[in-house]
Image: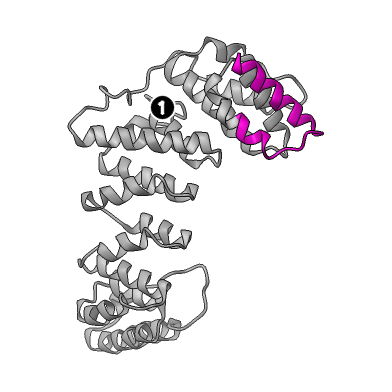
Amino acid sequence: MSKESLKIFLDNIGSYKPREDNYDISGWSDILPDEKVIAEGALFDAAQKGDTRAIVTIGLLNLNNGIEIINELAKSSNPWIRFSANRSLQLLGGSSEGLKEDATSENWIIRLGAAIELKGKDAEKTFLNLLEDSDYAVRSTALDNLIDLYQLKALKLDSSGRSNLAAPLSVLDLQLLSKVSLLWQKGSAETVFIFTSLASGKSPEAIGLVYKSSAPKDFISIITSSFFDYENPFATNLIELLEEHDRNWAEVFLIFQLDYFATPRCSRAIVALEQLKVKWALPALEELLKKLKPEQTLYLETAKAIKVLSM
């Protein structure tokens, strides 16, 4: 069994599996100690040749006897080799400074990878910086890391333990996932303020992170069902009754739709924002108008909403 496990492991090295970033280590425990020397040698050889999956696998297997090789690879001019080595170094208990540098890479995938891999209080400043990243996935990952760091996941759940989309932290995530400049930049600034305040000793309650309901339990389902029912006008009457956190979710939800200007979602959102007098949406509407042509119906709707909300 052991020799077969060794053969499977060795045969796997160098195989092409584009959706995997490390080699399968599930059979590692079946390999005998003296055989592991062979397997380790094969991994080290592959890593030195630039095999990024081998580099990461060395870290996952905690092969500290390969740390000199990984340290050398972390100096590589190839960004993917360098990133993989920095991942491995952190797994081996080494410095995370390399991953922090990767978080400033020109390549958004490497920045996202660094955001995913970085752990602990030592990376908090990096997470705060990544909240201003140009890529929505990087921003959202940074927020998730900060939520984990401060153990705030429960604040995104309702009393039954299910996800609460209207909870302040959930709405911040929606903003950071948006491509609408107004939303993600506002969300970024608010998130930095929140976690800076928490770091200074303020409680989640003191900065408004504890959800306060002002609506029926299923109000989000009612609103979204009406919004996406394109056969009928969107009913805004329930939104008009909402307050604080619930109202903030509804307004962010509507502004979020402005990026979908090739679909009916955008037009319905514009009309609703005008009806609800959501004045803070003005910069987003003005941004949208620049993307449209004067002869488009959506241009006229946007211009009308801007005029009404500017009064």
Instruction: Let me know if residue 157 appears in the view.
Output: no
**Residue 66 percent coordinates (x, y):** 24, 81
> Which quadrant does the N terminus fall into?
bottom left
Residue drawn at x 29%, y 71% is 59
Give the residue at mark 1.
167
Residue in front for this viewpoint, 289 or 123: 289
SS for callout 1: loop
Q: Is residue 232 above or below residue 75?
A: above
> Is 304 in front, or is 238?
304
Left/right placement of residue 29 relative to residue 233 reads left
The answer to whether residue 57 is left or right of residue 245 is left
Q: Please identify the quarter of the rendering in which residue 81 is found.
A: bottom left
- Residue located at (63% from left, 34% from top): 258
The image shows residue 72, relative to residue 162, as above or below, that is below
**Residue at x 21% of width, y 65% of height:** 95
> Which segment is the magenta one?
285-311
Query: Quadrant of the rendered structure where residue 255 is?
Result: top right
Residue 289 counted in the magenta span:
yes
**Would residue 199 be found to the left or right of residue 194 on screen?**
left
